[in-house]
């Protein structure tokens, strides 16, 4: 046995302890009821008997007796139960009397050894919990007064060291104290333990944001079932929660940044994601060159001009520096370079009112921290990418009382690094997009045109996503011979720069083929061969897996103002709409062939009469393929808009804008191209035609007929040139035309057109005659005296045509 100590004595303060009194150190004098419950012996059976007989091994009594030295001791012994089995118990012996003339008496307390061992473990656990400094513990009585706590309970909030007997309202802010007491009361009432409840608590001495605690609690009851109160364990998870919030903010910023390829929109997304998650106000400034897609280049003194591009939070932009222009010096090195700004002076700010503020020598020169009313703390970090300084972002806190921390500065530097890359990507896209848009716009004709055959107006709208304003839609108005005009609308598959390049190829090919005066169906056949060859060439270069097919649709129409007839053919393109003078709208019944580059099937032409003053509407499928309907519904809607806009009488530009204005407000899923052409006609009196015999005598006759007609038209100034041109062309037709009749036609339109047709299919060829040659100079003279000339095949041979600019009456033609 070992001597007893004050702490270990508490283990024998159990209500179920067995008690007995031993007289003289040998004989049982008194035997309690609890002793009977422990060993099964009654008082009558035990009292007066030697104590040694209660041992499981009576021979062990001397050893036990020798250890019982002093006034009080304790230890473990093995006793014999009344039913015969051995029972290990822990005993505590207390000296009652020890007079000189009488034998000493002792009080013996005993309990099962396993109960005492469990009590020791429980005691060690509780004391260990109250001694540690990581988990706060608190015991509350039924009136929710604090009975006991360990020191870490709210140490961060300035609480006193001894809080025993106090209510929570004496320590915490009233709302927080009421919430915690309600939580404890529920635990004591229901008896259900609660684990991991998060409560934010603020103390009276530190009423700032407080701390977030993970609280677990359970009810305390005595062995008799009496309510003793509640116990609660507090774990400070503020830093964990803040770390999770910072990580979540970083993830959200990463997801948001870069979703837009607009420099300004990227900075606005950056500001929006930081408010209110991290700051009450955010201001972003970028170098002016970045906004235009260029790289920022410091001035000779090493400074850059920043422009405010985004403001978010509870602040009026008008209260910020006027014009939002500031001059800064880019930082050096590759470090993130963020800084916590408190009361630092601000860099000099310039604007229309020339406002200035002193620059502090201690303030980093590349930080722009405009004064925000009511702000007390700020963070600022540069936006950098690929070693270039693009701007900076500044965060302010106004309503939030807590200043910025080093952890928040590190977070801002990480977000600013990612934002810098997003801004630089948007800048590079802006530069490339600007070049692509310029390329596309340079490949398209003017939006309006006026000529003898038609008056046109066009409108092009890029899709809202994908191509970013660059696509393969195109249109063209091509002047042809004999005052005719070619109208073209096409749509290349896909968006982006590749589609624009393909569109440029096809537009150039159409213009080249149109210059040969090919019929629409023949022109589309040649164009289809070209697209097929381009696809094959791309496949041979091994790029077929990384780019879209060069497939495209195209509609080509040729309008003749003399005959007022239009011939058109379609390669998978929607049919044109015809609006007549009476306001009726109908779609041309074209036979659409396959898209270009799909197959080698022929294309079918359609010929129709077009009354003078009618309007032809050519368009791409983006105008009629509505997001919530089919192409049939879209075409019906287009016809209704054409009927309401009255393009026959209203200006074509206004009509095009009105039609496109009727589209849904949602972003366009495909590009929209619309070409309106109001047809004109050449009056019968402005055309004269004669059929002449294939005889040299027809040459002077042709000159006389032409001269007389020019006199009737009042174009005497063109007589000499026209006689020369007519003589040369009729002579060639008589000499090389195959012997059939020769047709001469003069047309007065916006130019004077002279046409000579014969039955030969041999195209004339201009050559430079040598000094000794007696001929071969005719076509050369024709080319020098006329504005344009050329030849085209016809169904019965060919036609050579020339155009002369109309000169005002009374002037002399140039010789």
Image: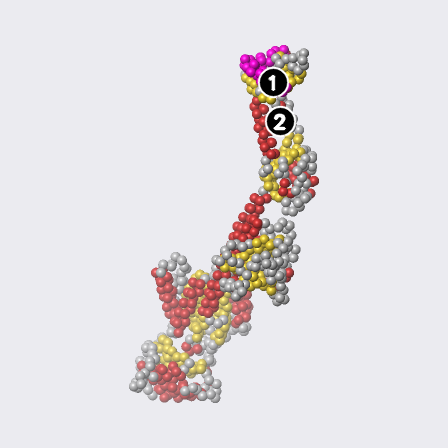
Which image quadrant: the C terminus? Answer: bottom left
- Residue 136 pos. (x, y %): 61, 37
At 62% from the left and 61% from the top, the residue drawn is 358
Secondary structure of the residue carrying numbered label 2: loop
Res 687 seen here: no
Which of pointers 1 and 2 lies earlier in the amino acid sequence? 2
Q: Is residue 62 magenta?
A: yes
Of residues 808 and 353, the one drawn nearer to the viewer in this rendering: 353
Query: Horizontal and vertical percent for residue 38?
Result: 60, 18
- Dot 1, how many residues are within 10 Å of its Cα: few (below 14), some (14-19), or many (20+)? few
Give yes or no for residue 312 being in the magenta stretch: no
In this rendering, would 670 be left or right of 165?
A: left
Residue 81 vs residue 639, the one in the foreground:
81
Residue lying furthest top: 48
Which residue is rendered at x = 56% and y = 46% of the image? 243
At horizontal 63% and vertical 11% (from top left) the residue drawn is 48
Q: Which residue is mark 2?
A: 7
* Residue at figure coordinates x 39%, y 57% from the top left: 545
Where are the magenta residues, as a range? 45-73
Task: Kindly identify which residue carries mark 1.
Answer: 69
The answer to whether the residues at label 1 and label 2 have Cβ atoms under 8 Å apart is no
Q: Which mark is residue 28?
A: none
Residue 768, visible in the rendered structure: yes
Residue 488 in which image quadrant: bottom left
């Amino acid at each position: 046995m070992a001597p007893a100590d004050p702490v270990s004595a508490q283990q024998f303060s159990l209500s179920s302890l067995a008690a007995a009194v031993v007289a003289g150190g040998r004989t049982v004098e008194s035997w309690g009821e609890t002793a009977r419950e422990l060993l099964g012996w009654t008082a009558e059976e035990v009292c007066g008997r030697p104590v040694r007989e209660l041992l499981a091994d009576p021979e062990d009594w001397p050893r036990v007796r020798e250890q019982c030295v002093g006034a009080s001791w304790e230890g473990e012994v093995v006793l014999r139960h009344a039913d015969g089995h051995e029972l290990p118990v822990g005993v505590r012996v207390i000296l009652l009397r020890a007079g000189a003339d009488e034998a000493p008496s002792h009080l013996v307390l005993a309990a099962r050894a396993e109960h005492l061992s469990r009590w020791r473990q429980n005691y060690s656990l509780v004391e260990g919990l109250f001694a540690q400094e990581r988990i706060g513990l608190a015991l509350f009585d039924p009136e929710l007064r604090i009975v006991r706590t360990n020191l870490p309970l709210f140490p961060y909030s300035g609480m006193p060291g001894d809080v025993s007997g106090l209510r929570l309202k004496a320590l915490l802010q009233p709302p927080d104290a009421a919430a915690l007491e309600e939580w404890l009361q529920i635990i004591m009432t229901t008896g259900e333990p609660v684990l991991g409840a998060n409560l934010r608590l603020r103390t009276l001495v530190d009423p700032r944001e407080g701390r977030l605690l993970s609280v677990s609690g359970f009810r305390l009851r005595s062995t008799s079932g009496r309510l003793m109160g509640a116990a609660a364990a507090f774990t400070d998870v503020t830093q964990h929660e803040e770390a999770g919030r910072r990580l979540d903010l970083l993830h959200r910023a990463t997801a948001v940044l870069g979703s837009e390829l607009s420099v300004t929109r990227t900075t606005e997304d950056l500001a929006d994601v930081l408010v209110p998650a991290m700051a009450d106000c955010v201001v972003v400034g970028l170098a002016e060159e970045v906004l235009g897609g260029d790289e920022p280049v410091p001035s000779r003194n090493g400074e850059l001009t920043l422009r405010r591009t985004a403001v978010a939070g509870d602040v009026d932009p008008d209260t910020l520096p006027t014009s939002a222009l500031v001059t800064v010096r880019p930082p050096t090195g590759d470090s993130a370079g963020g800084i916590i700004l408190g009361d630092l002076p601000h860099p000099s700010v310039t604007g229309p009112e020339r406002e200035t503020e002193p620059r502090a020598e201690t303030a980093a020169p590349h930080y722009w921290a405009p004064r925000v009313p009511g702000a007390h703390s700020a963070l600022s970090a540069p936006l950098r990418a690929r070693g270039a300084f693009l701007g900076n972002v500044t965060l302010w806190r106004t309503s939030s009382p807590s200043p910025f921390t080093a952890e928040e500065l590190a977070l801002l530097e990480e977000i600013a690094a990612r934002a810098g890359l997003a801004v630089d990507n948007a800048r590079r896209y802006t530069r490339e997009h600007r070049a692509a848009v310029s390329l596309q716009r340079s490949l398209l004709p003017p939006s309006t045109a006026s000529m003898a055959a038609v008056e046109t107006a066009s409108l092009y709208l890029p899709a809202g996503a994908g191509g970013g304003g660059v696509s393969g839609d195109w249109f063209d108005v091509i002047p042809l011979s004999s005052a005719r005009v070619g109208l073209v609308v096409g749509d290349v598959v896909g968006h982006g720069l590749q589609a624009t390049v393909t569109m440029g190829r096809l537009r150039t090919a159409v213009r080249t083929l149109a210059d040969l005066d090919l019929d629409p169906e023949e022109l589309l056949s040649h164009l289809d061969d070209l697209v097929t060859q381009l696809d094959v060439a791309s496949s041979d270069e091994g790029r077929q897996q990384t780019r879209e097919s060069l497939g495209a649709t195209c509609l080509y129409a040729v309008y003749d103002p003399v005959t007022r007839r239009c011939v058109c053919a379609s390669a998978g393109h929607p049919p044109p709409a015809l609006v007549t003078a009476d306001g009726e709208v109908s779609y041309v019944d074209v036979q659409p062939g396959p898209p270009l580059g799909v197959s080698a099937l022929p294309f079918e032409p359609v010929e129709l009469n077009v009354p003078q003053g009618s309007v032809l509407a050519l368009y791409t499928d983006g105008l009629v393929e509505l997001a919530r309907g089919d192409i049939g519904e879209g075409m019906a809607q287009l016809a209704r808009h054409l009927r309401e806009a009255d393009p026959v009488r209203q200006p074509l530009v206004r009509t095009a804008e009105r039609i496109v204005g009727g589209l849904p407000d949602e972003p366009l899923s495909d590009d929209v191209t619309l070409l309106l052409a109001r047809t004109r006609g050449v009056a019968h009196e402005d055309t004269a035609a004669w059929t002449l015999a294939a005889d040299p005598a027809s040459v002077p006759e042709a000159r006389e007929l032409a001269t007389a007609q020019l006199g009737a038209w009042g174009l005497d100034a063109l007589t000499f040139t026209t006689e020369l041109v007519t003589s040369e062309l009729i002579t060639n037709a008589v000499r090389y035309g195959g012997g059939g009749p020769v047709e001469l036609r003069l047309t007065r339109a916006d130019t004077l057109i002279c046409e000579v047709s014969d039955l030969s299919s041999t195209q004339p060829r201009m050559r430079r005659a040598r000094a000794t040659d007696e001929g071969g100079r005719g076509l050369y003279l024709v080319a020098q005296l006329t504005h344009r000339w050329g030849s085209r095949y016809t169904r019965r041979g060919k036609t050579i045509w020339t155009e002369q600019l109309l000169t005002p009456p009374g002037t002399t033609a140039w010789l």
